[in-house]
């Protein structure tokens, strides 16, 4: 036994080295060593002695072989499915659109191709307004020359920016703005329908008293076109809008403020009023990046899963307004620390769009052309429609 206090650290180090060299290994029973005394292990003499005595066995611990087994990918089959909705109608179908689009019809979560191939990929619409309004500078730069003409604005979005739909917003009908009459609003919709041949969404001003009248007039003038009337809520005359949609063959957006139960309740009201599931588009509200994106993501994912699990009141496609991202000040404010807003803004909208696309949204409203370009390409890649390039591209270039 060696007492560390009696002999000192150097004597202990020397003794341990001698024992290791003589016996190859040593066993110390019942030692009491404080932390600062453990430094003897770092002494070169001890390290050299220990390394010299380590056994060298080139064949030891080699595996005898691997167990052969087969991996089977676990597949989840859902009892329900999301209904398929058609957007637009061709001449043969009673409309004037050059092509139609379909959303929904899903049997599994988005892009889960290892479980099932969902028939329809997301669709991307661009916002157009019936009067010049205040827009974030990066958005305004791309449409400044056409803001006075909604028809030309719509053509630019489709022909130059690649929008698959147009989301036409009749903000001028708001009694607090220009309070344009419903007939004038309907005529503006007619001009947009003549300017482009893609399906369209038509929104009111958000005034719950005026919007039912506006959407009723729009539904009539767009008879047979299978447009989307945006939107109805529980606190407005939704019966009037539903009646017009049924009579003229349109779909209706069911808008609720971020609550699964409220969305389920409104959907049930519309169903009870006779509107089929494939003419109801859910809008549970888009909280953008920086404004609670995680809530919107969770909400849409829960709605999608509930529908797939068999909840018939939630088996409709989902719409998301990615353009709400421009409401976050980080997307548009001029701040050197955050980098140029010409790049930051489109990124803000794109992250919002792609995140909700992964959560289960089927139709997107977008403001900036760069977002449309990136989201379309990503969706096509994930559906195997495009060959995925491994090169890093400057996706933000040529955005104007």
Image (spheres, rainbow, N blue to C red):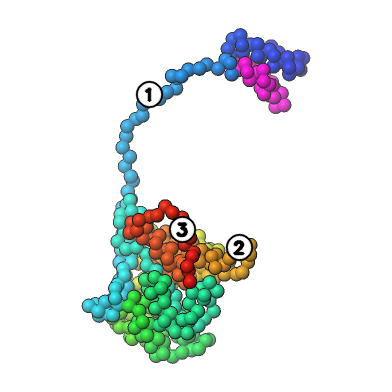
Badge 2 element: helix
Q: Position of residue 364 (x, y in %)?
A: 41, 68
Q: Is residue 398 left or right of residue 105?
A: right
Residue 39 visible in the displayed image: yes
Q: Are the two marked residues, 1 and 3, in contact with CB atoms closer than 8 angstroms?
A: no
Q: Nearer the viewer, residue 271 or 140?
A: 140
> Dot 1 corresponds to which residue?
64
Residue 214: which quarter of the image?
A: bottom left
Q: Residue at x 41, y 90 (%)?
A: 184
Question: Which stretch did the figure color magenta?
Answer: 26-50
Q: Nearer the viewer, residue 158 or 328?
A: 158
Q: CA distance from mark 1 to mark 2?
A: 57 Å
The N terminus appears in which quarter of the rendering? top right
Q: Is residue 45 left or right of residue 256?
A: right
Q: CA distance from mark 2 to mark 3?
A: 22 Å
Q: Nearer the viewer, mark 1 or mark 3?
A: 3
Q: Position of residue 105 (x, y in %)?
A: 30, 63
Give the mark, 1 or 2, whose residue is nearer the N terminus.
Answer: 1
What secondary structure is the magenta-colored segment mainly? helix
Dot 1 crowding, Cα within 10 Å, few <14, some 14–19, many 20+: few
Badge 3 element: loop
Badge 1 element: loop
Q: Position of residue 287 (x, y in %)?
A: 50, 66
Up-down: is 90 above or below 303?
below
Q: Nearer the viewer, residue 363 or 378?
A: 378
Q: Which mark is residue 393?
A: 3
Dot 2 crowding, Cα within 10 Å, few <14, some 14–19, many 20+: few
Q: Which mark is residue 338?
A: 2
């Amino acid at each position: 036994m060696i007492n560390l206090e009696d002999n000192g650290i150097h004597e202990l180090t020397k003794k341990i080295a001698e024992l290791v060299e003589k016996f190859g290994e040593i066993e110390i029973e019942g030692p009491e060593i404080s932390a600062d005394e453990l430094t003897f292990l770092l002494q070169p003499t001890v390290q050299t002695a220990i390394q010299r005595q380590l056994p060298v066995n080139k064949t030891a611990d080699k595996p005898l072989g691997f167990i052969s087994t087969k991996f089977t990918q676990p597949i989840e089959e859902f009892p329900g499915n999301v209904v398929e909705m058609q957007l637009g109608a061709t001449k043969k179908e009673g409309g004037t659109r050059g092509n139609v689009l379909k959303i929904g019809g899903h049997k599994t979560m988005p892009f889960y191709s290892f479980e099932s191939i969902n028939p329809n990929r997301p669709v991307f619409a661009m916002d157009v307004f019936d009067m010049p309004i205040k827009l974030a500078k990066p958005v305004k730069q791309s449409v400044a020359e056409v803001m006075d003409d909604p028809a030309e604005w719509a053509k630019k979005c489709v022909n130059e920016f690649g929008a698959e739909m147009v989301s036409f917003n009749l903000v001028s009908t708001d009694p607090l703005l220009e309070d344009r009459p419903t007939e004038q609003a309907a005529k503006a919709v007619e001009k947009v329908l003549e300017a482009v041949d893609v399906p369209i969404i038509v929104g009111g001003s958000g005034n719950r008293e005026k919007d039912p009248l506006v959407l009723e007039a729009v539904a009539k003038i767009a008879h047979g076109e299978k447009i989307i009337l945006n939107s109805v809520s529980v606190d407005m005359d939704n019966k009037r809008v539903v009646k017009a949609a049924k009579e003229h063959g349109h779909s209706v957006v069911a808008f609720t403020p971020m609550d699964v139960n409220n969305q389920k309740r409104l959907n049930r009201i519309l169903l009870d009023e006779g509107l089929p599931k494939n003419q109801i588009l859910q809008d549970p509200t888009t909280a953008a990046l920086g404004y609670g994106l995680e809530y919107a993501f969770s909400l849409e994912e829960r709605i999608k899963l509930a529908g797939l699990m068999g909840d018939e009141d939630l088996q409709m496609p989902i719409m998301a307004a990615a353009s709400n991202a421009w409401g976050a000040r980080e997307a548009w404010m001029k701040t050197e620390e955050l980098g140029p807003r010409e790049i930051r803004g489109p990124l803000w909208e794109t992250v919002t769009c792609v995140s909700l696309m992964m959560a289960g949204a089927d139709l997107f409203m977008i403001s900036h052309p760069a977002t449309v370009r990136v989201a379309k390409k990503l969706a096509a890649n994930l559906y195997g429609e495009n060959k995925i390039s491994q090169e890093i591209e400057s996706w933000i270039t040529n955005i104007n």
